[in-house]
Image (spheres, grey):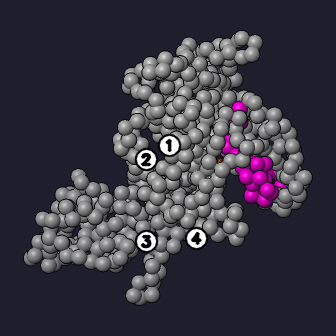
């Protein structure tokens, strides 16, 4: 039984130390969140799973960590500076501000599409419209229907680099990256030359991205600072459709390994009119983030997008491509990001398949599907977070049955230290055993090891399973091997 709604996870997160509201003691900062002692471990484990799967287990992907602040020209030629916009609307009655496309998606008939809108399609998206008024969609805040026309709003956070005379100094203007992908494209040749890769191959990156979202919300689903896991898979144009499908299938399988239930995943094929002009095909993997909504079609939202971006990005950052008048499309770059295939003697710009997923949305989906309630013998409802052992923030809790018995406490602490180098282990003696078990169940610890009076006699401990609550007696000498085997 997954969590009935996001609120359940918000309260568990705050209660147990997964996620806290950011800047809380100063009144918070609209939809910003801090990851606590358990949240940081869960997020790290998700990132490790992604990285291991792509970079270590495959033979064709390299890693990268590019700068958050790049030369402003990167964002000029990628198209973001002019067109990374959302359509903004205000309610004239209560002055609340919304994204027009999101309200249309929720209350109208169109699904929101990817935010990156490149120059060719800007006419469709930046023109002022009043579709909310036309469709008579009421303000979610006050219920009135009195909308302003929509107007474009650039989502990139601006900053200045170096000691500048004023904040308006155009020469010092820079942006916090709104996606990690561009850092990969501009390093394509560096990685290609130094790794001696042949097509097809990919470059993977995990890192923070920043978007000045108009309406952040739904806990960590949409925030202004978030973390992305993006991989750009470069290939020949003719191989792109097949590889695209392989990545769509591959990511569904990977999400399954994180414990996300197949019935809570669905695919959304972007319609031709929704596609960004650079994209040949884009498929979003949707997760049931809002199971409480009556209308089944409104329960879903984007967990990740997988796009066939054609050769748009490498061309956009290259010095050779020219427009119809024979002028360089990009007169500022010093490099040509084309690929030479010695086997066929061809030079071309590779196509790219981009699976892009947010760490935060993944973490939310993982927690929602791991959430379970179970009634004990006394009729009390207990929460169990059935995380995959590989994702669990803490793998083992060592608990002394009597915290005043020196022999038991010493042995328990020794076991904690012996296990710690191999698996994240904690020692806890701050409550009765029932309470300690319940606490570990709620944070997803797969195993509790209990040290009791008998342990001092028989050199064995009780290992309790989080999901079944079954207990097994295990010899201390065999304990590490036993746990490692069951933690995979
Ligand atoms: P949305 O339509 O929900 O705004 P998007 O299509 O703009 O998302 P992409 O640009 O494709 O998102 O980014 C890839 C992934 O990064 C998304 O699928 C999502 O998991 C994550 N992501 C994007 N924006 C945010 C955000 N503001 N907060 C948290 N995660 C985000």
Residue under circle 2? 50
Q: Which residues are magenta?
A: 94-118
Residue under circle 4? 4
At horizontal 59% and vertical 67% (from top left) the residue drawn is 5
Query: How many other residues sit within 10 Å of disc 1, few (<14), some (14-19) or many (≥20)?
Result: many
Labels 2 and 1 touching (C-beta < 8 A): yes
At horizontal 63% and vertical 64% (from top left) the residue drawn is 290
Whole-percent x, y for residue 206 in the image: 47, 40
Of 274 and 394, the residue lying toward us = 274
Q: CA distance from mark 2 to mark 1?
A: 8 Å
SS under mark 3: strand
Question: If you read the primary sequence from the N terminus, does the residue marked by circle 4 or circle 1 appear first?
Answer: 4
Q: CA distance from mark 3 to mark 2?
A: 25 Å
Whole-percent x, y for residue 140 in the image: 78, 60
Labels 2 and 4 touching (C-beta < 8 A): no
Query: How many other residues sit within 10 Å of disc 4, few (<14), some (14-19) or many (≥20)?
Result: some
- 109 in magenta: yes
At horizontal 23% and vertical 52% (from top left) the residue drawn is 421
For residue 81, above or below residue 318: below
At horizontal 78% and vertical 59% (from top left) the residue drawn is 107
Q: CA distance from mark 3 to mark 4?
A: 14 Å
Whole-percent x, y for residue 57 in the image: 36, 44
SS under mark 4: loop
Of 41 and 480, the residue lying toward us = 480
Residue under circle 3? 384
Residue under circle 1? 229
CB of residue at label 3: within 8 Å of ligand 1?
no
């Amino acid at each position: 039984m997954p969590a009935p709604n996001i609120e359940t996870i918000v309260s568990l997160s705050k209660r147990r130390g997964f996620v806290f509201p950011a800047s809380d003691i100063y009144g918070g900062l609209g939809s910003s969140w801090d990851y606590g002692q358990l949240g940081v471990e869960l997020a790290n484990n998700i990132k490790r799973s992604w990285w291991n799967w792509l970079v270590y287990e495959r033979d064709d992907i390299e890693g990268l960590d590019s700068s958050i602040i790049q030369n402003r020209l990167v964002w000029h030629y990628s198209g973001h500076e002019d067109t990374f916009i959302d359509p903004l609307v205000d309610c004239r009655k209560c002055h609340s501000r919304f994204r027009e496309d999101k309200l249309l998606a929720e209350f109208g008939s169109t699904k929101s599409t990817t935010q990156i809108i490149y120059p060719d399609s800007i006419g469709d998206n930046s023109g002022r419209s009043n579709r909310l008024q036309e469709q008579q969609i009421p303000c979610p805040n006050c219920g009135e229907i009195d909308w302003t026309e929509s107007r474009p709003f650039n989502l990139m956070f601006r900053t200045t680099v170096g000691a500048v005379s004023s904040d308006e100094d155009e020469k010092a203007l820079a942006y916090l990256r709104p996606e990690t992908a561009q850092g990969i494209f501009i390093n394509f040749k560096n990685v290609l030359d130094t790794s001696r890769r042949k097509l097809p191959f990919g470059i993977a990156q995990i890192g923070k991205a920043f978007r000045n979202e108009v309406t952040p919300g739904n806990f960590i689903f949409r925030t202004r600072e978030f973390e992305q896991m993006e991989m750009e898979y470069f290939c020949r144009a003719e191989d792109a459709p097949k590889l695209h499908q392989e990545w769509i299938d591959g990511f569904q399988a990977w999400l399954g390994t994180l414990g996300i239930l197949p019935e809570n995943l669905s695919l959304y094929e972007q319609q031709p009119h929704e596609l960004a002009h650079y994209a040949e095909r884009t498929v979003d993997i949707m997760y049931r983030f809002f199971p409480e909504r009556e209308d089944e079609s409104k329960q879903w939202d984007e967990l990740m997008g997988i796009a066939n971006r054609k050769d748009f990005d490498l061309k956009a950052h290259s010095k050779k491509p020219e427009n119809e008048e024979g002028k360089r499309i990009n007169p500022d770059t010093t490099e040509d990001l084309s690929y030479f295939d010695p086997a066929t003697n061809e030079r071309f710009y590779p196509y790219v398949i981009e699976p892009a997923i947010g760490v935060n949305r993944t973490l939310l989906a993982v927690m929602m599907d791991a959430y379970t309630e179970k009634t004990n013998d006394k009729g009390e409802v207990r929460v169990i977070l059935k995380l995959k052992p590989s994702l669990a923030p803490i793998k083992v809790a060592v608990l002394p049955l009597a915290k005043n018995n020196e022999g038991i406490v010493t042995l328990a602490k020794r076991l904690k230290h012996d296990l710690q180098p191999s698996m994240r282990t904690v020692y806890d003696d701050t409550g009765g055993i029932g309470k300690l078990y319940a606490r570990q169940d709620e944070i997803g610890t797969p195993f509790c090891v209990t040290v009791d009076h008998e342990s001092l006699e028989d050199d064995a401990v009780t290992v309790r399973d989080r999901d079944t609550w079954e207990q097994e007696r295990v010899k201390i000498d065999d304990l590490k091997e036993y746990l490692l085997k069951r933690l995979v």
